[in-house]
Each structure stands twice: as structure tokens, then as C-alpha cells.
Image (cartoon, helix red, strand yellow):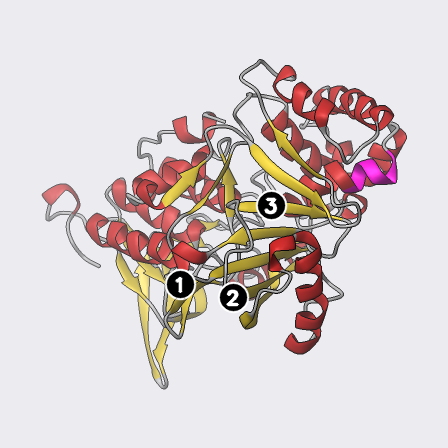
Amino acid sequence: MTRSQGGSPQSPDRTAVVVGGGLAGITAALELADAGLQVTLAEARPRLGGLAFSFKRGDLTVDNGQHVFLRCCTAYQWFLDRIAARDLVTLQDRLDVPVVDADTGKAGRLSRAGLPVPLHLAASLARYPHLSLRERASVGRAALALRGLDLADPALDGTDFGSWLAGRGQSARTIEALWDLVGVATLNATAANSSLGLAAMVFKTGLLTDPGAADIGWASAPLGDLHDGRGRKALDAAGVATLLRTRTSGIARSADGRWQVSLETGPGRGEQLTADVVVLAVPQREAHALLPEGAVQHPEKLLQIGTAPILNVHVIYDRQVLREPFLAALGSPVQWVFDRTESSGLTGGGQYVAVSQSAVEDEIDLPVATLRDRYLPELERVLPAARGAAVRDVFVTRERTATFAPTPGVGALRPGPVTRAPGLYLAGAWTATGWPATMESAVRSGLHASREALSALGLPVDNRVLEAA
């Protein structure tokens, strides 16, 4: 790491080490490299992408979980463009979500019209069959109250969203059939267990700002093709040295004030890198273990940020049972069902669906046989075409610490990108981005960290991506 900056032999290049190869780490590494730093990215796993990855199961390519983004996720879409992966995703022209009630058999849709906010949702809400006329009217009043909240008010962080909704006339059914339908999927928690600050951010940004903000996007190819494949190509093109299967074991100041990053590259093998900038883009507990003493004022806060699981039940049928790209369910343990047939490479005329389950603390460790017995009959209730269809395979993927828990008070625990140690920065969806634990939050954190680093080095910073939302 001794190239001369700008071709000048008098001074070595400024160097950076990014610890972690998830979306936050990839973003930070690209931004630092684009600014002229010599960057090394160290990732303990054998692949990039963090918790948004794929793996092989026989002839199938399986995503570990279903990940979506919204049109308002401008930083993640910038990331897709930066790694040249826009062609591997699908984005709805207009929000359209089929919603089926397994108890009543009623089917409805949440969709938008080409009208200004809030009229863009009015027609859909008026036809929504899962709420009574009175409940639909109450939603409008709560939405107006939500729109009037100041997201900068710290009091919102200490209030739970469920109590706030109940105080604005929202019935238990309204919360289940509308607010939690969206909130559980985006926050990974029910309204009762969600910070009002984070919930207000989700609903204001996604539904109450721009008419198209909540249009849904998803990967039409395996996630590994995006974040690992295209991400690695972008890093290589930017000149980033990417080290996989490389665990960071320590970070310390050297005598000259620069950073020494100790890496374990294999059994009994290691190396040490010297850097001007270090970005820790790892989960909060890993960051806590690596932070030098005094780097953050209250390091115990990182350990107080809880985690929440996500479970995916993957089912392969002998025929088509779902005629939409996805649907949401009510009156059933099933939350969301996605068609993964094409992206997985399944052939032979069957269909592969994935049941995506958030906020499932009570189910995350259940045996596969138990989950199979629980969800296959429920899928037949939600998808009538599954009745009588042969099941070729059922398997489960689990992320026990998929996201940080968005509980009331979590905002006061999330640190910003700048530490008290010059040249050391934090990134990750769990840091103080203002967003819940999403791919958008991860990319934003990488942008925040890298741009703080560049600013401290006196290098130009372009904040337009962060300001776009």
C-alpha cells in the first residue's frame, strides 16, 4: 500500500481498510476508491453481500431471504447503478399488492393511482375489502396525523407505534390488515414493538411524500449475482483489493498515528495493514469487539441494540400455484409469498414459492418438520391452487439476527459514522441513518461513513445521493 498519490513520488497514497463486505462495506469501499484512496476490503465470509446473498441447493440458486426495495430507496438504486446491476431488478410501474384473507377468502389490492398525495391511495383504500367503511375512514385521519409528525422530534423514538395508532382510533383489525401489513415487512416488528420514530419515517417516506415512493422493487436474478457478482466486478474495476475469508482480529493505533489492522487470512496465517482510514462495516456486536478503547463514548450502547430474526420457508410445487409475483396474507401465519421460480433457475414445469416471515421470534428455531406442518396447510388456505398440488421439496432458511430490533428507544442507541478516534468510522444498517434495517439503510451508512472520511481528509464530497430523498 505504497503507491504515490497523483503520480507524485514525494508522498504515499492515502490508504483505507474497510472491514465487512456487505452493502455498507461495498459502498464505502467504492466511494473511497473513487476519491483516489488505495482501498482494501476484508470480508470474513467467502462472498460479498452480507445478509443479502444466494447459495446453491442442487440445481437451484436460492436467496437466503426475500429482499425488496421501494422507489423511495434512492441510495440503494444509486448503488445498483454504481455496480451496473440495474438490469437485474424489477421495479413496479405503480404500487400494486394483492392481499388475501385466508379466513374469509376475500381478495383485495393495495395500489396507487396517478394522483397527488394523499389522493393516490384514496381509491384503493375505498375498495379495500379487509376493513369496514368506518375503519377505512379512520385510516385517513391517522395518516394525516402521521404526516404531521416531525421526524426530528426525539420524543417519537421513545413511543411505540401501536399505542400511537390506538390513540388515533385504529382498531386491532385495522392495525393487522393495514399498518402491520406494511410495518412488519419493513421494520421487522409489529406496531406494538416498533419505535414511532422509525414507523413514521417508513410511512411518511413511502406513502405520504411522493405518489410513486412505495412502488416495490425486487431482484429478478439471484441476490448473489447482484451484490457478490456485480459488486465484486465494480470493486475490481475501482482498484479495491478484496480479501475474502479474511477475519479482522484487531485495530490499533501505530506510533505514527495511523491505523494498524490485523487480519487472519487462514489457519495460522495473518497480515497487518496500515491505513489512514478504517471503516468498520460489521454488525454492532462485532463492531463493539473491534473498537479501540475510547473510540466511542458509550460503547455499551452497541450491545443494547437488539436483533430480530427473519424466517423463509421455501416450497417447490409440481405446478403453478401463485399467479402474481407476490402477495400478502391476512388471517394466517403466512405474511408474504413470493414467486422465485425464474430467478432460482427451476425448470420442469413446477413453481418455487418463498414464504417470507418477519418478526418471528417464536418460530425461528422450530424444526423444519414443524414448520412444514404449519405452513403447507396455510399455503393451501392462502393459495387455493396449491390444494392438490404435489410438494416436491420444502426447506428453510433462517437469519436469527437479520436486522436490528426497531424497539422504542433504539434511536438513542444508534451511533453516527464518526467516532472519537480520528480516521475510524462506523457503517452498517444499524447505525444512525434514520432508516430501519434495510438495504437502503446499509448503503446510506456506507455513504455517510465514506463521505465523513473524505471530508476529514480535505477531499471533495458529493452529497447529492443522500440529499435526493
* Residue denoted by label 1: 346
Residue 263's x, y, as percent?
37, 71
> What is the C-alpha distance between the residues marked 2 and 3?
17 Å
First along the sequence among labels 2 and 3: 2
Q: Residue furthest bottom?
A: 268
User: Could you tell me if the residues under marks 2 and 3 are in contact, i.e. CB atoms within 8 Å?
Assistant: no
Q: Nearer the viewer, residue 139 or 384?
A: 384
Tag 1: Cα neighbours inside 10 Å, few (<14), some, or many (≥20)? Answer: some
Q: Amino acid at mark 3?
A: Leu
Q: Quadrant of residue 141?
A: top right
Q: Is residue 236 left or right of residue 430?
A: left
- Mark number, residue 316: 2
Magenta stretch? 171-176
- Mark number, residue 103: none
First along the sequence among labels 3 and 1: 3
User: Could you tell me if the residues under marks 2 and 1 are in contact, i.e. CB atoms within 8 Å?
Assistant: yes
Residue 463's x, y, as percent?
40, 29
Whether 248 is drawn above or below 135: the answer is: below
Whether 81 is drawn above or below 333: the answer is: above
Residue 454's x, y, as percent?
36, 39
* Residue denoted by label 3: 327
